[in-house]
């Protein structure tokens, strides 16, 4: 069997060709203007040797956070959408508030633990476009949840008129690169 040494598609990947979908944050992703494919790191183990230690591949894979930036709308609807999600998975203003929220969520389904876990997270996709702006492939994220939402800084001394943008950082269980039909690449 001969190996193919040439790239079949010689078009370059465009940094502006993407769409984003996150089930629990549709308003935020609509105004997204930056996103990333997170890096992956494989852990390293060390095999001891009397001459020198030898690095060998480890058994755990580490994923960088998924981050996207979005333009904030005038009424803060997209910003508040993410803030409500974060408040719903943490302790908003009082312990009784989170306990009441957890009880209401777990009473919806007899499989209480998994139902609560599914309510905390959301699946999402970063769809990468071709040079002709058609869907090319997607990065499918499983069990996303926001853990950081950036500050919005107001500054009356700004000389340029720049609109507000915010950055949100997500943790997730896994991501996979798949084609548009859902097949692994």
Image (spheres, rainbow, N blue to C red):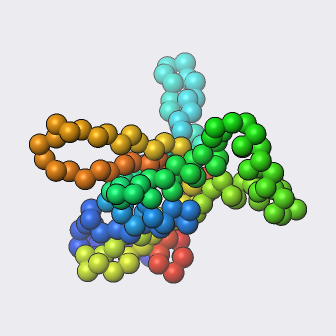
What is the quadrant of the N terminus in the image?
bottom left
Measuring from the top left, give residue 45's x and y in whole percent: 56, 33
162 w.r.t. 22: above or below: above
Quarter of the image where one finds residue 104: bottom right
Residue 38 seen by the camera: no
| Residue 122 horizontal side relative to residue 159, left or right | right
Extreme-left residue of the structure: 159
Measuring from the top left, give residue 182's x and y in whole percent: 54, 76
Kindly identify the residue that appears in the image at 16 percent across and 40 percent down. 158
Kindly identify the residue that appears in the image at 29 percent across and 50 percent down. 164
Extreme-top residue of the structure: 50
Measuring from the top left, give residue 144's x and y in whole percent: 57, 55
Front-most of 123 and 106? 106
Kindly identify the residue that appears in the image at 53 percent across and 43 percent down. 147
Front-most of 110 and 182? 110
Quarter of the image where one finds residue 33: bottom left
Residue 28 seen by the camera: yes
Front-most of 23 and 57? 23
Quarter of the image where one finds residue 123: bottom right
Kindly identify the residue that appears in the image at 39 percent across and 48 percent down. 167
| Residue 35 horizontal side relative to residue 161, left or right | right
35 w.r.t. 30: above or below: above
Measuring from the top left, give residue 53's x and y in whole percent: 51, 24
Front-most of 43 and 173? 173
């Amino acid at each position: 069997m001969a190996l193919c040494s040439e790239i079949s598609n010689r078009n370059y990947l465009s940094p502006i060709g993407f769409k984003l979908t996150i089930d629990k944050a549709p308003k935020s992703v609509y105004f997204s203007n930056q996103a990333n494919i997170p890096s992956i790191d494989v852990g390293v183990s060390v095999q001891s040797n009397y001459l020198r230690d030898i690095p060998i591949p480890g058994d755990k894979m580490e994923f960088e956070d998924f981050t996207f930036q979005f333009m904030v709308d005038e009424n803060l609807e997209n910003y508040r959408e993410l803030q409500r999600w974060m408040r719903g998975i943490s302790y908003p203003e009082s312990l009784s508030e989170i306990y009441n929220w957890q009880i209401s969520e777990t009473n919806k389904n007899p499989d209480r633990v998994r139902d609560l876990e599914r309510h905390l997270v959301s699946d999402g996709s970063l769809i990468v476009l071709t040079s002709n702006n058609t869907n090319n492939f997607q990065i499918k994220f499983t069990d996303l949840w926001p853990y950081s939402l950036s500050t919005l800084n107001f500054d009356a001394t700004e000389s340029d008129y720049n609109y507000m943008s915010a950055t949100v950082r997500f943790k997730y269980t896994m991501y996979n690169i798949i084609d548009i039909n859902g097949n692994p690449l």
